[in-house]
Amino acid sequence: MRRLLVTVFLFVAIAFSVQASEPDVIEEAKVETLEWLALTDTAQYESSWDSASTLFKAAVAKEDWEKSLSAVRTPIGALETREMAASKFRSTLPGAPDGEYVVFQFSSSFANKATALETVTAMKDTDGAWRVAGYFIK
């Protein structure tokens, strides 16, 4: 009986330690995500591709990324404000391999677009670093 209690206690302790570290994981991913967004905000599209995840790079060619992002970001103008609206840790995402992901949503405004919702997905890449794996602006 005592052995069972110890096992249950260890299981609960491990479960709580995993939960307790989730905010730390989100914060790590947030730091990298904001650095990546700063590249897009200053039209450093090539650098944003270079610093993106291996999954991102496999999905879109650098030249295509630069053209697409320029076509989206240039008309809306310079960033005015960006506030994090939500963040969620995920271990699975549709169309992506299982792993560690954080999906961020930012309420943003730009010079020519007063209200925008930016969704940025960060992933823990193959080398253990957090990198952006997806970007969508609406």
Image (tube, helix red, strand yellow):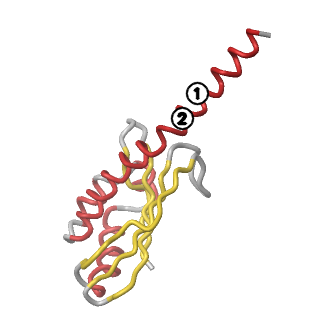
Q: Quadrant of residue 99?
A: top right
Say left or right for 72 vs 58: left
Say left or right for 75 vs 104: left
Q: Give the residue number, with chain letter if any, for mark 1.
A: 14
* Mark number displayed over residue 73: none
In the depicted structure, whether residue 124 falls above or below residue 83: above
Q: Nearer the viewer, residue 16 or 133?
A: 16
Give the number of callouts.
2
Q: Residue at x 28, y 54 (%)?
A: 50
Query: The C terminus is located in which quarter?
Result: bottom left
Q: Quadrant of residue 44?
A: bottom left
Q: Give the residue number, with chain letter if any, for mark 2.
A: 18
- Residue 129 position, x and y percent, is 36, 41
Q: Secondary structure at mark 2?
A: helix
| Pointer 2 local density, CA inside 10 Å: few below 14, some 14–19, many at least 20 | few
- Residue 88 position, x and y percent, is 52, 55
Tell which residue pokes out farthest to the right in this image: 1
Look at label 1 and name its amino acid: Ile
In the depicted structure, whether residue 40 falls above or below residue 97: below
Look at label 2 and name its amino acid: Val
Cα–Cα span, label 1 and label 2: 6 Å
- Residue 130 position, x and y percent, is 37, 45
Say left or right for 46 vs 88: left
In the depicted structure, whether residue 52 falls above or below residue 137: above
